[in-house]
Amino acid sequence: MNELIIVKPDDMHLHLREGAILKYACKDTAKQFGRAIVMPNLKVPITTVNLAEKYYQDIKKVISNSNFEPLMTLFFSGSLNNDEIKKVSDSKVVHGIKLYPSGVTTNSDNGIDTIEKCFNIFELMQEHEVPLLIHGESNDKAVDIFDREKVFIDKHLSEINSEFPDLRIVFEHISTKDAVDFVVGTNNKICATITPQHLLLDRNDLLSDGIKPHHYCLPILKRSEDRLAIIEAAVSGSQKFFLGTDSAPHFRHQKESSCGCAGIYSAAYAMELYTSIFESENALDKLENFSSKFGADFYKLPYSKSKIKLIKKEFRIPAKITIENEEIIPLFAGETLSWQLSEI
Ligand code: NCD
Ligand code: ZN
């Protein structure tokens, strides 16, 4: 196959940031995706529908020449009440609420300390049919960083699912075989997003032959067995698994530092990366559902009426992206892929 035309994909997990970076991040995503679930972990988190509507307008303003549609989310806070959740449910702009255990990742200090205290809010979300998006890692510093996802499943996620069986949940950026097995074994209310880095890399790519700060993200890359289980899930054709890049730009100096930031930038070449992976698994026929349909089904959105074209042509990811006076090093910088996004 030398050419692939598919329904325009949706990125169901994206960080667009604010300030100078916003315009560039939006432009990169809009070339590849028609819509994206926009994460609310700004420096001042997006905790209300009013703030989400303002952020939505900021995004629309910087990308006014495109049909790109940001799908907004709220940052889960303990002060969410029935009125606000009803507002989310009625909103055309906000599509879910993202829960970060406090301190688990970039800009999550205002997250949740005690999950059990949120059960009344989960109840309201279930009632109003508002999806819960979860960064599923334990924030217990005593838990080994490689075990935090598994501990979160065992301590919290299983219980949330059994207490609230009708609550729609996205288990974000799964990174372990445990997470794949858990999602496969639950009812059809739990789905998971899969990033390019968790399909392409394992912890050796991060930590052996020198530390690679540009491969540092959270959840941290795991073992090769985990990566293989995630690949199998992505190409399985199961509607429980769909695309979410978790593209999260940080400037080069913030990552190449004595205390480097977590987050990998993949937005600009995401479909080239996913297509290359699906091709090497002989699963190009599964790419469209994974990229353009299963996520929309979960969020109860219509499929895009636009299409994108990918052609089989060698393509080199640039070594860096320059934004004003700063640099971002994208995922697989300088590497050659066999597929390229093309004009339709
Ligand atoms: C994300 C970020 O930088 O906002 N970082 C990351 O490593 N994935 C936050 C997140 O999704 O964990
Ligand atoms: Zn993220």
Image (cartoon, rainbow, N blue to C red):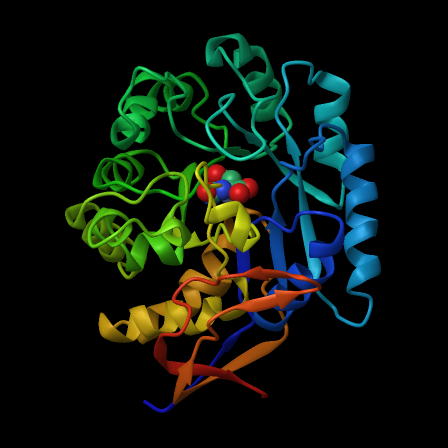
Of all residues shown, which one is farthest toward the left? 225
Query: Residue lying farthest top?
Result: 117
Percent of width and height locating residue 15: 59, 48
- Depth order, front residue of 111/234: 111
Q: Quadrant of residue 95?
A: top right
Q: Is residue 237 above or below residue 156?
A: below
- Residue 315 in view: yes
Percent x, y for residue 57? 83, 50
Residue 320 at x, y = what percent? Answer: 51, 68
89, above or below 228, in the image: above
- The residue positioned 57% from the left and 78% from the top of the image is 307
The quadrant in which residue 34 appears is bottom right
Rendered residue at 41%/39% (across/down): 218
Q: Specify whether residue 296 is in view.
A: no
Question: How many numbered marks are there?
Answer: 0
Residue 158 is situated, as x and y percent measured from the top left of the image, at: 33, 22
Split into 4 quadrants, where in the image is the C terminus?
bottom right
Q: Residue at x 34, y 68 (%)?
A: 286
State the residue in front, 145 or 260.
Answer: 260
Residue plotted at (38% across, 39% down)? 188
**Residue 241 appears left or right of 115:** left
Where, quadrant-wise, is the N terminus in this rendering? bottom left
Which of 85/310 is in front? Answer: 310
